[in-house]
Amino acid sequence: MSLENLRGAIDDVDARIVKLLAERLLIAGQIGLEKRLGGIPLNDAAREATVLERVRRLAEAEGVSAAAVENVYRHIITSSKSVQDVSTALQGETGTQVGAASYVIPEGDWRIPERRLGHSRTTKRFAIVGGAGRMGRWLGKLLLAEQMDVILIGRDAGRLSVASSELKTVATTDLRAAGSADVIILSVPINGFASLVEELGQYVKPGQTVIDLTSVKVMPVDMMHKHLPNCLTLGAHPVFGPGAESLSGHNVILTPTNDPEQALAQWAQTWLETHGARVRLMSPTEHDRLMSVVLGLAHFIAIVSGDVILNQEDHAGLEMASGVTFRALRALVASVLGEDPELYAAIQTNLPDLPVLERSFIEKAAEWADLVAAGNAIEFARRMRALDDRLERGESRAAYNALYRITEK
């Protein structure tokens, strides 16, 4: 085997070692949570001695220097204890069962207890289920910047390890950890939402706040009401992606369905607006009706346009001949096609008004195509002018100028 091939083999081994180390540190964080919940001291000299003795025996069996392996493992144990220290720090004061207090709303008094929403600096604790995803990490950064405690929860140990390292906060694959939080945020795919919430129902405590961030609202809100009846729940939709630099200038929709949720939504609206977000409150049904146009139809048009454009043969010629309108369309197509296909498929198939809207789009497209095929330029121009008249005065010219600014960057 050549030197290059041998070095490649070493690189492969190193990659596996690092992945296993990441998995070990993630498990160490879970052990830290268990120690805290069980009142077990962090340091365990007897367990450390057992681990070191075991790896020495394994090293000797493999014909490797036991002293060298022990030295490596002392560093690993130190790192593991550091991770455990972080995870236990997020569990609150000694003897405190964080999140165990009942959430009782006196009749006619819909104030949200400050402890539940973490207004005290010592009790702000958020669990982000789906914390290894792009939006989960984005939200984690935002909350950590606000000096809040954050624990990331997910199913993929490798991705969680990366997210934990990036955000410098604890992560775990154990959904039970959500029970230690004041606020649980669900940043998970739509298709797995119902089963996740059903499982989460086993671990939440009365009075915990649970907020979902899915792109549809009727189904998730119904599922939270069904499986988390003793929690304060709220549907929320940040109508932007993890590429946003901040909340400033972006839309967030909240969908309260009763008085306690309305109070929570008003508190959240105030907090979000102080960070520059534009917030609207509406019902889950109204949200999904609007999203059928804002997300569903827009994505559908971009995907179908991409299907047509990318099936043309002369891509280089198209690029060379393109003007601002085509470049903007192609940018839209590329931005949509580059997103998570499963997420976009779930949005398409979970917005109840969307099939009718897309059928209407197809019918309208056929009408316009018929005008083109018939060479009816007069009627085409008349209809186009009539649509422009329905826009705000000056909107079309401003949009055209904006396209130039976007495509020339």
Image (cartoon, rainbow, N blue to C red):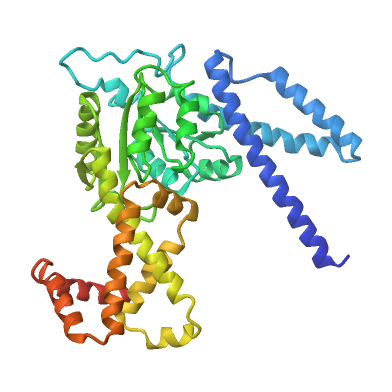
Can you tell which quarter of the image residue 85 is in?
top right
Depicted 29 relative to depicted 251: above or below? above
Asked whether 334 or 227 is in front, the reply is 227
Task: Give the quarter of the figure containing the N terminus.
Answer: bottom right
Can you see residue 26?
yes
User: Where's residue 319, x and y in %?
Assistant: 42, 83
User: Where's residue 95, x and y in %?
Assistant: 46, 11
Task: Give the quarter of the figure containing the C terminus.
Answer: bottom left
Q: Is residue 248 left or right of residue 313?
A: left
Q: How many labels does the image show?
A: 0
User: Where's residue 258, x and y in %?
Assistant: 22, 26
Q: In this view, does 12 lie to the left or right of 253?
A: right
Depicted 292 relative to depicted 409: above or below? above
| Residue drawn where x is 52% and y is 35% of the image | 171
| Residue drawn where x is 30% and y is 80% of the image | 324
Depicted 163 relative to depicted 172: above or below? below
| Residue drawn where x is 18% and y is 76% of the image | 384
| Residue drawn where x is 55% and y is 13% of the image | 39
User: Where's residue 226, x and y in %?
Assistant: 38, 25
Can you tell which quarter of the image residue 358 is in?
bottom left
Q: In this view, does 352 lie to the left or right of 24?
A: left
Can you see residue 182?
no
